[in-house]
Image (cartoon, rainbow, N blue to C red):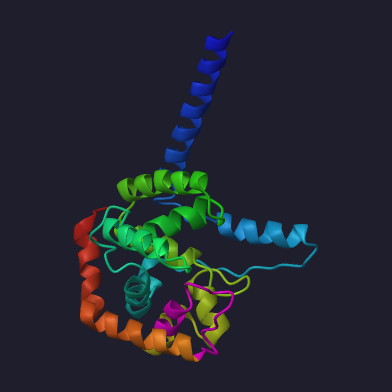
């Protein structure tokens, strides 16, 4: 009886793991119509008895401007072309900081954020981190770096109900994402750590300072030329 139960559990586990890999493979080519983060926001609002609507329009890789691609890499994950989903140096630095400080510093790469936003929930737990690592591994194996950044820019939250770069550009600056000016791109990247409390259209002093820092980092990385490294990292 115990052996049969164990076999059933193992088969179920294997099936779930295989299904997750197939889903990641499918999304290499198919744009996800919704993200887990969007569903979570909708569910929380419904349970709280609040109305909720979201905006999102997919912008394909060629339509996403280089200035926004670079701004997000500079702000969120400067080692993005070089790692395989996990920035070990950043993780060690975050662990050291968190031991000696009341503030919590994260070390999630863009790939990890894609895994979380697309497939998982946002609360902190070891189980979620384990699943995040699993999905990150397969995203890095099966997607190109360009695809990872494309999905990230179309899934990131940029305000209440505002998901993806196209919706963010329209909401904050009344312009299509293809027409974003450099400063607008830097400011959008600057609000990403706290998109529900920071505004790109009405940036605080701290947000404006972070946007200036991002612009400096973009220049130090080499500007849009840096994006060429994404092509040499993975091939489609």
| Residue at the image position 51 percent from the left and 44 percent from the top | 127
Q: Residue 5 in the image: x percent, y percent?
A: 57, 15
Q: Is residue 223 above or below residue 18?
A: below
Q: Residue 147 in the image: x percent, y percent?
A: 36, 58
Which image quadrant: the N terminus? top right
Q: Residue 19 in the image: x percent, y percent?
A: 48, 35
Q: Is residue 173 above or below residue 100?
A: below
Range of the magenta residues? 185-204
- Left or right of residue 236, residue 149 in this image: right
| Residue at the image position 25 percent from the left and 77 percent from the top | 224
Q: Residue 90 in the image: x percent, y percent?
A: 31, 62
Q: Is residue 24 above or below residue 193?
A: above
The answer to whether one can see residue 51 in this image is yes
- Left or right of residue 41, residue 30 in this image: left
Front position in the image: 14 or 129: 129
Q: Is residue 69 magenta?
A: no
The residue furthest front is 100
Q: Is residue 217 above or below residue 112?
A: below
| Residue at the image position 76 percent from the left and 67 percent from the top | 51
| Residue at the image position 28 percent from the left and 85 percent from the top | 216
- Left or right of residue 204, residue 133 in this image: left
**Does the magenta stretch mainly form a helix, a strand or a loop?**
loop
Q: How many marks?
A: 0
- Left or right of residue 52, residue 99 in this image: left
The residue furthest right is 49
Q: Is residue 202 magenta?
A: yes
The answer to whether one can see residue 181 in this image is no
């Amino acid at each position: 009886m115990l052996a049969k139960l164990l076999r059933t559990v193992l088969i179920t586990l294997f099936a779930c793991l295989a299904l997750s890999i197939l889903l990641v493979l499918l999304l290499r080519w198919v744009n996800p119509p919704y993200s887990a983060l969007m569903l979570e926001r909708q569910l929380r609002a419904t349970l709280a008895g609040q109305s909720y609507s979201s905006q999102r329009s997919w912008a394909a890789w060629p339509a996403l401007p280089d200035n926004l691609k670079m701004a997000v890499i500079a702000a969120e994950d400067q080692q993005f072309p070089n790692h395989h989903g996990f920035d070990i140096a950043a993780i060690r630095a975050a662990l050291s900081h968190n031991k000696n400080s009341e503030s919590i510093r994260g070390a999630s790469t863009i790939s990890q954020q894609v895994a979380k936003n697309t497939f998982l929930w946002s609360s902190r737990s070891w189980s979620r981190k384990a699943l995040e690592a699993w999905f990150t591994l397969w995203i890095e194996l099966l997607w190109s770096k360009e695809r990872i950044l494309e999905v990230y820019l179309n899934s990131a939250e940029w305000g209440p109900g505002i998901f993806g770069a196209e919706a963010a550009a329209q909401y904050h600056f009344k312009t299509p994402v293809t027409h974003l000016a450099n400063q607008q791109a830097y400011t959008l990247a600057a609000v990403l750590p706290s998109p529900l409390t920071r505004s790109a259209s009405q940036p605080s002093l701290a947000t404006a300072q972070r946007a200036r820092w991002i612009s400096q980092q973009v220049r130090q990385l080499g500007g849009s030329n840096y994006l060429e490294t994404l092509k040499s990292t993975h091939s489609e």
